[in-house]
Image (cartoon, helix red, strand yellow):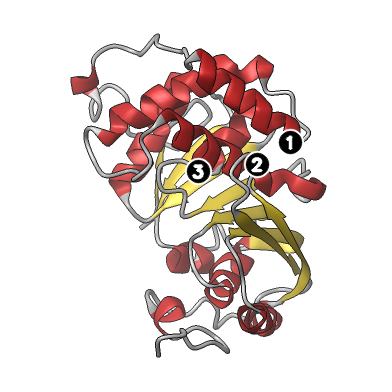
């Protein structure tokens, strides 16, 4: 059964506090908020490429980096632990999902498969969004809730649960205006898992690396089966590094048929209209 974990805005009954209990060994609330001068300059440079002035948020990004590295001592959250990699490949990469204005909404944004809190936490720092950060791994969600508290975010809620179960639940099905995903799965899998969570008219914003024409075609077919359509694919380069990235946007155009999503594990094991390249 899905479980909410509290950040500043979680009002669910019986909520479990994780910042004092789960992370007690990390000591009191962290007050280390400094990026190095080089790190701050790198973040500002990347922000300029994205059309963002990130100078008001340097302290919060510094706290987020500190929280990520502290959490990494307790569990495997990320393979990226240098300041340069964290800034470019986590912070700036997360912010690219707001390209072209598709993230603009007054409703809730659902981060499907948030992992260590990306893209949800950088987005919540910079944009006035209410973000629901969801993952199937409880320890990761506990970390995200704690990190949001350390950064001082009051616009993040966390949720433990598998996407298949959440998409079939009346509590979450067709309740969100945006779903964001970052390198979670193949596009046909994302279509089946994410579109059931969206209101009609809502958008799935999928952050991916290079994507083939075959995956795009299969993703469009899967979206059509689940109540959506392929809206746009935007190819660009990650700021500073120039690594190829793709932003794929699916739009929910009608209610999702009751048979989707299929039971746990099936969407990834047997994707709609798609066979993995090594099969």
State if disc 2 and disc 1 touch (CB < 8 Å): yes
Give the quadrant of residue 14: top left
The first of marks 1 and 2 along the sequence is: 1
Disc 2 marks which residue?
Answer: 239
- Observer-side mark, 3 or 2, equals 2
What percent of the width, then of the height, locates residue 170? 55, 62
The first of marks 3 and 2 along the sequence is: 3
Residues packed near mark 2 inside 10 Å, few (<14), some (14 to 19) or many (20 plus): many
What percent of the width, then of the height, locates residue 247? 68, 59
Residue at figure coordinates x 74%, y 23% from the top left: 53
Q: CA distance from mark 1 to mark 2?
A: 6 Å
Q: CA distance from mark 3 to mark 1?
A: 20 Å
Label tally: 3
Residue 189 vs residue 107: left or right? Answer: left
Disc 1 marks which residue?
Answer: 49
Residues packed near mark 3 inside 10 Å, few (<14), some (14 to 19) or many (20 plus): many
Q: Is disc 3 placed on a helix, strand or loop?
A: loop
Res. 66 mark: none
Residue at figure coordinates x 49%, y 83% from the top left: 271
Disc 3 marks which residue?
Answer: 118
Residue at figure coordinates x 81%, y 49% from the top left: 100
Front position in the image: 216 or 205: 216
Where's the C terminus, which quadrant? bottom left
Residue 64 vs residue 170: left or right? Answer: left
Front position in the image: 20 or 71: 71
Q: Is disc 1 placed on a helix, strand or loop?
A: helix
State if disc 2 and disc 3 touch (CB < 8 Å): no
Q: Is disc 2 placed on a helix, strand or loop?
A: loop
- Observer-side mark, 3 or 1, equals 1
What percent of the width, then of the height, locates residue 261? 52, 76
Residues packed near mark 1 inside 10 Å, few (<14), some (14 to 19) or many (20 plus): few
Q: Taking 264 as reference, is 30 above or below it?
A: above
């Amino acid at each position: 059964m899905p479980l909410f974990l509290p950040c500043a805005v979680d009002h669910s009954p019986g909520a479990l506090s994780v910042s004092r209990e789960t992370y007690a060994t990390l000591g009191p609330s962290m007050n280390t908020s400094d990026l190095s001068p080089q790190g701050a300059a790198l973040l500002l440079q990347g922000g300029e490429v994205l059309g963002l002035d990130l100078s008001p948020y340097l302290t919060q990004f510094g706290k987020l980096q500190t929280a990520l590295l502290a959490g990494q001592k307790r569990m495997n959250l990320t393979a990226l632990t240098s300041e340069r990699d964290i800034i470019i490949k986590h912070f700036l990469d997360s912010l690219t999902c707001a390209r072209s204005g598709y993230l603009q909404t007054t409703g809730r944004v659902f981060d499907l498969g948030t992992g260590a809190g990306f893209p949800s936490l950088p987005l919540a720092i910079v944009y006035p969004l209410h973000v629901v950060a969801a993952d199937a791994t409880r320890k990761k969600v506990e970390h995200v809730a704690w990190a949001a508290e350390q950064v001082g975010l009051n616009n993040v809620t966390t949720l433990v649960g598998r996407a298949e179960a959440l998409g079939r639940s009346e509590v979450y099905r067709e309740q969100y205006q945006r779903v964001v995903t970052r390198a979670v799965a193949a596009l046909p899998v994302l279509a089946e898992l994410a579109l059931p969570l969206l209101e009609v008219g809502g958008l799935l914003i999928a952050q991916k690396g290079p994507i083939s024409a075959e995956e795009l075609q299969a993703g469009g077919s899967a979206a059509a089966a689940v109540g959506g359509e392929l809206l746009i694919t935007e190819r660009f380069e990650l700021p500073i590094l120039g690594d190829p990235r793709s932003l794929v946007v699916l739009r929910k155009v009608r209610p999702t048929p009751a048979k989707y999503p299929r039971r746990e594990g099936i969407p990834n094991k047997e994707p709609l209209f798609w066979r993995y390249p090594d099969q």
